[in-house]
């Protein structure tokens, strides 16, 4: 008898995300098992309890998901999980804290599609990208993905010192010292928007980060994307349902991508990653780079 598909879901938070539980079940995981308030020191023990509870063959139907709220913490736990495996006792592991990895992947993939379809630009390489409200989990990973794709990225926050710390984390930890994201402050966004090709709003819900005046003053803005579905929009004039829709008042002909359009690509990326775990015959370790690959794949399949 084949063993049931069990996904052990770890989070540092006091609750496991219901969104992630539903996603796991819909992808085919029969039994998503929650582990809350998990500390980094506990990861090794939990992973080894998982891998030694079934035969090497039975582990094919077993996986680990890492959630939580902190991107670095999740990446550290992913590394710890990998280092805790004892071949041939290994299982696939997928990290997606706060859904940030798959949301960021969906956001960048959707923007990449628009610059190709609407402006005949083949890639993000050498484009100037402005990330507003960028110090949170989604903004961090959007910055890294875009920089790895060759864009010139400026991540903006309210306080330069905090923003610089986040940028250093993105460049060194997530980008492995191979990218060069720059830090900026919200007070100077009027200056930054003058050379911006793509603007991403990744701040807290209900806060306008790019107003109509700044949109009108952006001479080369091509795409503006917003993850906020709660009024007011993070980008003036952008509706959650907008999906390559022209932005009213943009003199450069920019198009907008709203939260629900981004969310659809995010959903598809997360679903495909969870299914990839089910289908894998070997241990795989999935994070934001894998999410971007699958988000891109999904977007291309719809063009």
Image (spheres, rainbow, N blue to C red):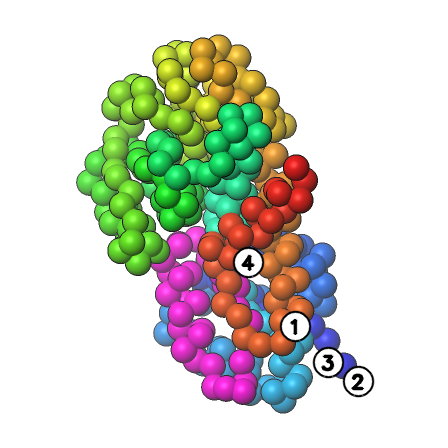
* Residue 226 horizontal/vertical position (percent): 49, 31
Q: Say whether residue 163 is left or right of residue 11.
A: left
Please tell me whether mark 4 sits on a helix, a strand or a loop.
Answer: loop
Task: Report if residue 278 is visible in the image.
Answer: yes
Residue furthest to the right in view is 1
Q: Which residue is mark 2?
A: 1
Q: Which residue is mark 1?
A: 6
The CA distance from mark 4 to mark 3 is: 24 Å
The CA distance from mark 2 to mark 1 is: 15 Å
- Residue under the image location 63 percent in, 76 percent down: 281
The CA distance from mark 3 to mark 2 is: 6 Å
Q: Which residue is mark 3?
A: 3
Q: Which residues are magenta?
A: 66-95
- Tell me, yes or no, whether the two marked residues, 3 and 2, touch with CB atoms within 8 Å: yes
The front one of 2 and 194 is: 194
* Disc 2 residue crowd, few under 14, some 14–19, many 20+, Cα 10 Å: few
* Residue 100 horizontal/vertical position (percent): 48, 48
Q: Quadrant of residue 278?
A: bottom right
* Residue 245 horizontal/vertical position (percent): 59, 22
The front one of 164 and 127 is: 127
Please tell me whether mark 1 sits on a helix, a strand or a loop.
Answer: strand
- Residue under the image location 54 percent in, 75 percent down: 283
Please tell me whether mark 2 sits on a helix, a strand or a loop.
Answer: loop
Q: Is residue 88 magenta?
A: yes
Please tell me whether mark 3 sits on a helix, a strand or a loop.
Answer: loop
């Amino acid at each position: 008898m084949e063993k049931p598909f069990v996904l052990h879901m770890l989070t540092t938070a006091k609750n496991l995300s219901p969104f992630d539980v539903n996603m796991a079940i819909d992808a085919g995981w029969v039994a998503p098992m929650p582990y809350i308030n998990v500390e980094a020191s506990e990861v090794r023990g939990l992973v080894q309890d998982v891998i030694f509870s079934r035969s090497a063959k039975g582990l094919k139907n077993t996986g680990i998901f890492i959630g939580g709220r902190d991107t670095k913490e999740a990446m550290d736990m992913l590394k710890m999980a990998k280092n805790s495996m004892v071949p041939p006792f290994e299982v696939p592991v997928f990290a997606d804290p706060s859904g940030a990895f798959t949301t960021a992947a969906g956001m960048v993939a959707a923007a990449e599609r628009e610059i190709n379809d609407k402006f005949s630009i083949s890639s993000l390489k050498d484009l100037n990208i402005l990330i507003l409200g960028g110090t949170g989990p989604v903004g961090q990973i959007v910055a890294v993905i875009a920089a790895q794709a060759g864009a010139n990225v400026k991540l903006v926050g309210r306080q330069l010192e905090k923003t610089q710390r986040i940028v250093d984390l993105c460049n060194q930890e997530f980008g492995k010292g191979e990218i060069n994201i720059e830090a900026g402050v919200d007070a100077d966004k009027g200056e930054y928007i003058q050379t911006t090709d793509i603007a991403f709003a990744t701040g807290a819900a209900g806060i306008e980060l790019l107003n109509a005046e700044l949109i009108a003053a952006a001479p080369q803005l091509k795409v503006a994307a917003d993850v906020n579905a709660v009024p007011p929009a993070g980008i003036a004039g952008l509706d959650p349902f907008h999906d390559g829709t022209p932005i009213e008042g943009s003199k450069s002909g920019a198009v907008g991508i709203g939260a629900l359009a981004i969310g659809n690509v995010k959903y598809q990326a997360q679903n495909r990653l969870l299914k990839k775990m089910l289908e894998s015959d070997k241990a795989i370790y999935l994070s934001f780079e894998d999410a971007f690959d699958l988000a891109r794949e999904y977007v291309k399949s719809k063009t």
